[in-house]
């Protein structure tokens, strides 16, 4: 769990922004979104295959330039 120490005379909004950035770096936000609903194993496999296809297509497009 990321933590942020509030500095002297630092506005709350700025500390909150630093905390949110730390959470994003740690991957908490994507993990929370991923666990909001149940995903069947077949759906997970389909999503991962689609992501792999997109990645390969992008790499091939970069290669062909």
Image (cartoon, rainbow, N blue to C red):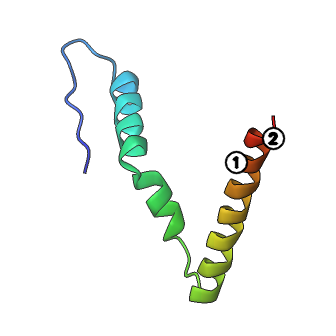
Q: Is residue 39 above or below residue 18?
A: below
Q: Residues within 10 Å of mark 2 (few under 14, many from 20)?
A: few
Label 1: state its secondary structure. Answer: helix
Separation of residues labelled 2 and 1 (CA atoms):
9 Å
Q: Foreground residue, 65 or 58?
A: 65
Q: Is residue 30 left or right of residue 2?
A: right
Of circles 2 and 1, the one toward us is 2
Q: Residues within 10 Å of mark 1 (few under 14, many from 20)?
A: few
**Residue occupying image coordinates x 34% and y 36%:** 19
Determine the image quadrant of residue 14: top left
Q: Which residue is mark 2?
A: 64
Q: Which mark is residue 16?
A: none
**Residue occupying image coordinates x 68% and y 78%:** 46
Q: Foreground residue, 10 or 38?
A: 38
Quadrant showing the C terminus: top right
Q: Which residue is mark 1?
A: 59
Residue 44 x, y percent position in the rendering: 60, 78
**Residue occupying image coordinates x 63% and y 87%:** 42
Q: Is residue 5 above or below residue 20?
A: above
Residue 36 x, y percent position in the rendering: 52, 70
Q: Is residue 45 above or below residue 14?
A: below
**Residue occupying image coordinates x 71% and y 68%:** 50
Residue 11 x, y percent position in the rendering: 33, 18
Q: Is residue 53 above or below residue 18?
A: below
Q: Foreground residue, 61 or 5?
A: 61
Label 2: state its secondary structure. Answer: loop
Q: Are the residues at dot 2 and dot 1 in contact (C-beta closer than 8 Å)?
A: no
């Amino acid at each position: 769990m990321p933590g942020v120490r509030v500095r002297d005379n630092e506005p709350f909004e700025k500390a909150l922004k630093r905390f949110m950035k730390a959470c994003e770096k740690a991957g908490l936000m994507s993990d929370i979104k991923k666990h909001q609903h149940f995903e069947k194993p077949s759906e997970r496999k389909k999503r991962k295959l689609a992501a792999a296809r997109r990645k390969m297509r992008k790499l091939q497009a970069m290669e062909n330039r």
